[in-house]
Image: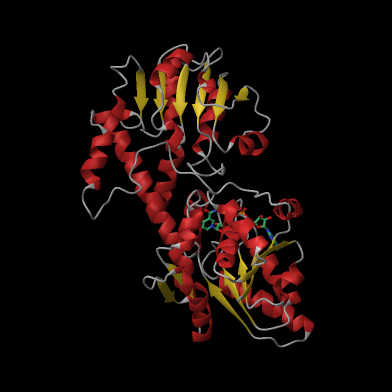
Amino acid sequence: MNIAVIGTGYVGLVSGTCFSEMGNKVTCVDIDSSKIEKLHKGIIPIYEPGLEAMVLKNVKNKNLYFTTDFKTAIENAEIVFIAVGTPMGDDGSADLQYVVSVAKSIGETMQESIVVVDKSTVPIGTADKVRITIQEQLNKRGVTINFDVVSNPEFLKEGAAINDFMKPDRVVIGADNNYAVEKMKQLYAPFSMSHDRFIAMDIRSAEMTKYAANAMLATKISFMNEVANICEKVGADANQVRIGIGSDSRIGYNFIYPGCGYGGSCFPKDVKALKKIASEYDYDAKLISSVEEVNDAQKLVIANKIIKRFGENLTGNTFGIWGLAFKPGTDDMREAPAIYVVKELVKRGAKIQAYDPKAMYEAEACYLKNIENITYVDSKYKALENADAMVLLTEWKEFRSPDFDEIKKMLNTTVIFDGRNQYNMFNLAEKGFEYYQIGK
Ligand SMILES: NC(=O)c1ccc[n+]([C@@H]2O[C@H](COP(=O)([O-])OP(=O)(O)OC[C@H]3O[C@@H](n4cnc5c(N)ncnc54)[C@H](O)[C@@H]3O)[C@@H](O)[C@H]2O)c1
């Protein structure tokens, strides 16, 4: 099939590349010319394991193209994906300006019947908005061209995006006619050869499914963080409680690891957007609001432990930070807990020595830009040189089983703050460390 993917970010680039891997002819479009230039040179603008090799292979095979020219991209396309950002607006709702602008461009340029697919995470009712916007442009041009609008929310996880896309748990399609469902089934058939993972439903339910999924996962995280905070107060150990409850198959072990809160490009904005959607329909989403409140506070739990240990004024203190990305396997720093922890410490006069395997450029160029007192170093142990404590914020594999003798050698003191409860099995007290974690 000929496919156009509009928006070449985490979702657009991964989706487009994976569709091309299955033999489709895919053109990825972006308005960011520097991104497209990089891709033309074989440089992948984001870090995602396995992505680079797959992009280069499919460009070489002439299955994958990149352009800033919208018209060329949709000229022969049978299916056009909208995969642009839907960032948090000022009032907490999803900002639809990029989606609407793409819909307008589609209406202005399309020549043949197409299926337009909303892959961006969008509020309920957006497919109607996209349909109306396209139709308005066709009316202006005085032409009659059939088109369908379909919702196909994306569930990939950054850091495992290729695997998630190639072997999805499910493919959700919201559509209002059989032709569109069948077209999408054909496109996705190669991704579910062993058993059918295709779930067709009405459009609004598909749009809602994405928000419900993210809100459920965020709820599990906030729930466990709240339990961990209570554990600490009552003298229980959140690590043991986690194992105790996770063993119940109705609860499960996933997403109940106590930590310094969820971040990233999806959970924070999608939880907020769902709360806003509910309020627009006169429903007060109390649970969703609490999930967000718990998470906002959780991002500062480690910073508060540091302040309790070293004092309100941290002038003269240096902290070695391990991990800046919002989770391992990505360079994405959107809403990462590290942003909040670092800012809180620096505000109190602390110096930071930071190391992350992939996110240091993002941190320096954008999310921690213009913050003085941060030095970025190229190895985890260098970040601890003459520091007063080590602070773990992202559970990258290379941090999982460090050389604690080396850590001791580098640090001024022997204090470890573990924002991801990675080291509770290492008996750090016996090794002579002062060890702080979440929920104990
Ligand atoms: N990142 C994830 O893990 C993830 C997972 C599931 C769903 N989503 C959803 O997918 C959508 C995209 O997320 P993302 O993380 O890929 O965003 P992103 O910011 O990485 O990428 C969006 C891209 O769209 C481009 N763009 C904006 N307007 C455009 C236009 N008019 N024409 C062409 N390109 C345009 C931007 O330049 C940018 O490169 C969002 O709605 C997000 O909530 C993201």
Whole-percent x and y of residue 106?
Answer: 70, 73
Q: Quadrant of residue 284?
A: bottom left
Question: Where does the image place residue 4, in percent across and percent down from the top left?
Answer: 65, 69
* Residue 9: image location, x then y, percent: 62, 55
Residue drawn at x 48%, y 41% as measured from the top left: 328
Ligand 1, seen in the image, is in the quarter at bottom right
Quadrant occupied by the C terminus:
top left
Q: Quadrant of residue 23?
A: bottom right
* Along the line of sight, the residue nearer the viewer: 34 or 373: 34
Q: Quick check: 364 left or right of 426?
A: right
Q: Position of residue 138 (x, y in %)?
A: 73, 81
The front one of 249 and 220 is 249
Q: Residue at x 69, y 86 (%)?
A: 145
- Towards the viewer: 161 or 433: 161
Q: Is residue 284 visible?
A: no
In the figure, 286 relative to 99: above or below?
above
